[in-house]
Image: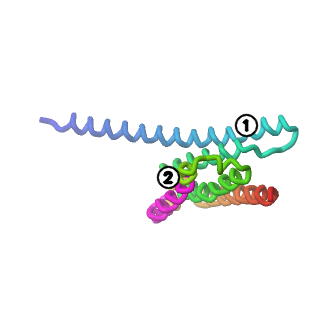
Amino acid sequence: MSMMPVIFFTNFVSSIKIMEMIDFVFIVGFLSQVCYGARQLVQWIMTERFKRVVSPTGYWAFSLAGCCFMLWYGWLREDIVILVGQMLSFYVYVLNLDYKGAWKRIPLPIRIIFYLIPIVALIATAMNAPHLVDRFIHNPEIPLWLGQSISIIIFSRNLYVGYRYTKNKN
């Protein structure tokens, strides 16, 4: 009896699982971008309503949701740049929700879960760091100089904007 049908079936099932995973990763990344897009929309609508630039609570809530999805996306893609950048941005969003008084209105168990998300991501990243760094450095899809340059520029800008906003509010 030939093993060809068994091998074909096994390969077919494996390819379906890979496609489902790719679709799932795409959906998580898309949800992240939906949240980040929604925050801009909220800020734009509120700014137009008040006829001045404002930073509504919804902006920071969507930022936090987008950050959580992006952390998940970075982990699924095994992308250390996304993971590190989002871990640092996470607490800027929490801090701004706290300044607006919205953070304390979230039930304590949920806040604890939110606090643990980047800590768990950091531990998981540290445990898998050699693989993630190797994957980043040897990723044929992204030239090293380009990935590093873009990441540094975006991260520095986000950190600076978050710092200036927080400093100006106090």
Question: Vertically, is 168 above or below 42?
Answer: below
Q: Mark 2 and mark 1: span between their CA atoms?
A: 27 Å
Residue 95 location in percent, x, y? Answer: 68, 56
Question: Vertically, is 148 above or below 69?
Answer: below
The quarter of the rendered structure image containing the C terminus is: bottom right
Residue 23 location in percent, x, y? Answer: 47, 37
Is residue 42 in the magenta section? Answer: no
Q: Which residue is mark 2?
A: 75
Camera-side mark, 2 or 1:
1
Q: Residue at x 55, y 43 (%)?
A: 29
Q: Residue at x 73, y 53 (%)?
A: 99
Residue 11 location in percent, x, y? Answer: 30, 39
Is residue 115 in the magenta section? Answer: yes
Q: Nearer the viewer, residue 163 or 156?
A: 163
Q: Which circle's residue, 2 or 1, is located before the other in the chain?
A: 1
In magenta, the rendered stretch is: 114-135
Question: Vertically, is 63 above or below 115?
Answer: above
Colour scheme shown = rainbow
Q: Which residue is mark 1?
A: 41
Q: Quadrant of residue 1?
A: top left
Magenta segment main secondary structure: helix
